[in-house]
Amino acid sequence: MLRLRAWCFGLLIVFLIVMVSSASAGERFTDNGDGTVTDHQLGVMWAKDDNQGDINWRDAEKYCKWTFPYLIPARYDNWRMPTIEELKTLYIRDKDYKGYETDCGQKVKMVPEIRLSCGWVWASEPMTIDYKLKDRQIKVRTISSKLFNFHRGYAYTDLMRHYKAYRALPVRDLQEGK
């Protein structure tokens, strides 16, 4: 009888652990109700929507840093463009996930908590070239930058001046008390 109780108790513990872990897995994002979504996995806050139109890299940088903060009711600081690694975490690789259709007609496999109006998002990393001049190393910024394609799930580079179907998606690091 004691073995049966211990076995049932062990089974109950395993069940509770599975339930808690699956519940917390579904809580990666919290909609803040102000045009932003908190990403608990990365410790960042995303804009709920992109900039809603074609944009080049320099204007995307300005949109994220200066324009977007004034479009939302809550006044958070430190908005920026996301890195490629941050964007990759928003892509759903599950073959069974169908994704959603964007306003430009492209299917994307993006997390449903964030809505894109088209499937390509600029990243913050401009391409650089390293030169060695005499005894020092110089890093020179090029005219290209990285983007992430949420239709196919890969990163690539393009000229910063291009804008057709490219979007800006602001993100900010969470700070204590904000």
Image: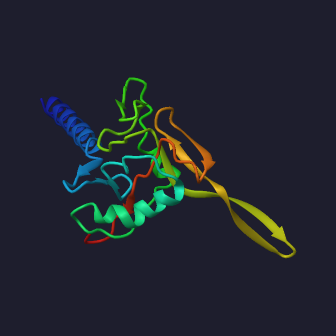
Res 109 quadrant in image: top left
Who's the residue at 47% across and 33% down the image?
151
Q: How is the image coloured?
A: rainbow
In front: 60, or 175?
A: 60
Q: Is residue 19 above or below residue 133?
A: above
On the rendered image, what quadrant is the C terminus found in?
Answer: bottom left
On the rendered image, what quadrant is the N terminus found in?
Answer: top left
| Drawn side of residue 13 relative to residue 95, left or right | left
| Drawn side of residue 59 relative to residue 99, left or right | right
Q: Is residue 92 visible?
A: yes
Q: Is residue 136 above or below residue 57?
A: below
Q: Is residue 172 above or below residue 47?
A: below
| Drawn side of residue 92 relative to residue 22, left or right | right
Q: Is residue 173 visible?
A: no
**x and y percent of residue 137 in the render?**
77, 71
In front: 98, or 160?
A: 160
**x and y percent of residue 3 in the render?**
18, 31
Q: Is residue 177 above or below residue 17?
A: below
Who's the residue at 51% across and 43% down the image?
164
In front: 58, or 90?
A: 58
Who's the residue at 41% across and 35% down the image?
92
